[in-house]
Amino acid sequence: MKVYHGSYIKIEKIELTKCLPQKDFGQGFYVTKFRHHAENWAKVIGKKHNTKGFVTEFDYTESPFAQSICKIKHFDDYNEEWLDFVVANRQNEEKKTTHHFDIVEGPVADDKVQNRIRDYTSGIISKQDFLKELIYHEKTHQICFCTKVSLQLLKNTDKMRVSKFAHISEPIVENLVTDFNLDEKTAADKLFSSDTFSKLADTSNLLCEKDWTETYNLLLNELKLTPPTQNSPN
């Protein structure tokens, strides 16, 4: 399954210790199968951090092997069990683990739902009435990877692409370093977060089969960069 994580930065390494507690399914790394939801969140969180926001794509391996190494909890929809589970995690003042699942999958308590959860926990609305409201709520989805073991089932698609197109990406990064005096990480970030790299990864346009210099020139054009040799007077 293709899943997506929206953030203000590109995700290179997942560190569970940096993930915030008191989320819907507890502390963990969250993704969704709905790319547009990840894109919307990336814009929101990116604006707060003065970045354009990034969406990182992953492959989530769903297989008997996954079931054998991970304890997985799946909520098919908003229901009483889901509500009790979310409330327990969001009201977890001690910020300790409230469950022992490696992976939890189910609907999202977005802003509107969170507000009604507060109404429910404050006694303003009954559980039954709240659950009736959720029947008409927009379809949402999230998966929380709670343990290091669970992360073995999540593969960064961008890193897979980097390896696949190494014969093109490596000389491009090297030339960005030498032509514009960049460090390797900055040069790599410019390439892998660009629209040009997205075109390169789309094998239908055959760009990956052409000489790397063609991709490099497209990237320079996108980034509005001019190689030093072209800056020199004739």
Image (cartoon, rainbow, N blue to C red):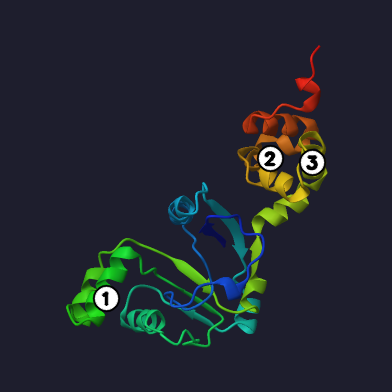
Q: Which secondary structure lies at badge 3? A: helix
- Mark 2 near mark 3, Cβ–Cβ under 8 Å? no
Would you say 129 lies left or right of 28 here? left
Q: Which residue is mark 1?
A: 118
Which of the two residues, 73 or 121, is positioned nearer the viewer here?
Answer: 121
x then y, percent, for residue 174: 82, 42
Local packing at callout 3 (Cα closer than 10 Å; few below 14, some 14-19, many 20+) is some
Instruction: Determine the residue positioned at 22% across, 75% down.
Output: 119
Report the amino acid beneath label 3. Answer: Val
x then y, percent, for residue 115: 27, 69
Instruction: Determine the residue positioned at 59% across, 76% down.
Output: 17
Q: Which mark, by number, is residue 200?
A: 2
Using the image, determine if residue 138 lies above or below residue 196: below
Cα gap from disc 2 to disc 3, whole angstroms? 20 Å
- Select label 3 or label 1 by which is in front: 3
Cα gap from disc 2 to disc 1, whole angstroms? 47 Å
Instruction: Determine the residue positioned at 33% across, 79% down.
Output: 83
Would you say 48 lies left or right of 147 here? left
Q: Which residue is mark 3?
A: 177
Local packing at callout 2 (Cα closer than 10 Å; few below 14, some 14-19, many 20+) is many
- Mark 2 near mark 1, Cβ–Cβ under 8 Å? no
Would you say 112 lies left or right of 57 here? left
Q: Reading the chain from its start, which is encountered first: label 2 or label 1?
A: 1
Using the image, determine if residue 176 lies above or below residue 163: above
Report the amino acid beneath label 2. Answer: Leu
